[in-house]
Image (spheres, coloured by chain):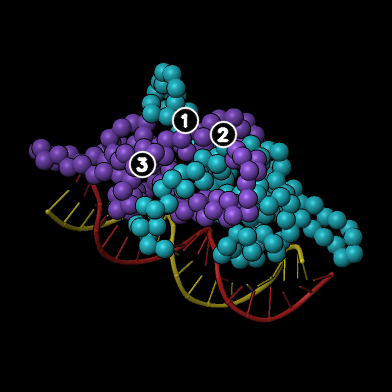
Chain colours: A purple, B cyan, C red, D yellow
Amino acid sequence: MPFCEGNHTREDSKKDLIALEDTLYVIGGKWKLKIINALYVNGNSRFNQLQQIVTGISARVLSKELKEMELNGFIKRNVYTDTPVVITYGITSYCSTLGPVLSTLIEWGNTHKDKIRKDYRN
Amino acid sequence: MPFCEGNHTREDSKKDLIALEDTLYVIGGKWKLKIINALYVNGNSRFNQLQQIVTGISARVLSKELKEMELNGFIKRNVYTDTPVVITYGITSYCSTLGPVLSTLIEWGNTHKDKIRKDYRN
DNA sequence: CGGAATCCAATGCGATACTG
DNA sequence: CAGTATCGCATTGGATTCCG
């Protein structure tokens, strides 16, 4: 049981597998964590801002991802009815519980960036 | 800077984004973390074992994933030339550095499983 | 500006059958 | 047992265009 404290039964392993599958089901995929991180770091952002920060994402995909994440409670869409209308996206408090997940992933990437770059030669 | 201690400059944010992208580039995708977790929990495992643990994966995809992860240094393929030959897969020490990543993801899934189940009604 | 609609190409991936 | 080969459907997603 390398990553959990205390005794770890077979039942626990089963639960861990399910928990991991749950998590990946919700925030897996190519873009979700990057979008969340962008909003985490930059605060409320507009659509085009977001598309610039999250490198490589198309408007179509960003639109679909935002809609899905809003539906699932990760993202809040704010409409300011000024003229012209301003729309921003931000994370919810539920989404902010992903902070430790993000920081762990970032830390791992920082620690191993040399090997990663070497293996994939970017 | 909700998930990092100390001061956090714009440069740091940029680096964080890159680190996150690096990490997701290497262990992103539908199966890799589940495979790694399975090996993490169960220790060295044979192909068919692995396919049973990682629910839903086909032999074709498992084969391709294992090959790719072996190439990238996450997995060690062991051949025991008994009769019959036994082949097992296990994680490398490099791969084991992902322990904190896995545990964070699992913990988040456990904490929010009720909401996840409600939203997706499984 | 913030998207939605359409079209099309690439990829993913399951099922099945087969092999050493 | 541990895979590989082939097929064919389904999904992803880029490019472009259009709209309020």
The image position of residue B101, as x and y in percent, is 55, 39
Identify the residue position indicated by label 2 in the image: A108
Please give the chain letter of the residue carrying mark 2.
Answer: A
Q: Depth-wise, is mark 3 or mark 1 nearer the camera?
A: 3
Q: Residues within 10 Å of mark 2 (few under 14, many from 20)?
A: some
The label on residue B16 is: 1
Q: Amino acid at mark 1?
A: Asp
Give amino acid for label 2.
Answer: Trp
Q: Is residue B30 left or right of residue A42?
A: right
The alpha-carbon separation of the residues under discs 2 and 3 comes to 21 Å
On screen, residue B68 above or below B49: above
Measured in 3D between alpha carbons, the distance from the residue under mark 3 to the one under mark 1, in whole angstroms, is: 18 Å
Q: Nearer the viewer, mark 2 or mark 3?
A: 3
Q: Is residue B108 visible?
A: yes
Question: Which x, y percent locates residue B20?
Answer: 49, 37
> Is mark 3 in CB contact (under 8 Å) with mark 1?
no
Check the picture and name the quadrant holding the C terminus of chain B. bottom left
User: Disc 2 on helix, strand or loop?
Assistant: helix
Q: Is residue B37 left or right of residue A84?
A: right
Residue B119 image point, x, y percent:
35, 57
Q: Residue at x 46, y 48 (%)?
A: B109
Q: Say which quarter of the image contains residue D10.
A: bottom left
Q: Secondary structure at mark 1?
A: helix
Q: Quadrant of the N terminus of chain B?
A: top left
Q: Badge 1: few (under 14), some or many (20 or more) residues near its Cα, within 10 Å?
A: many
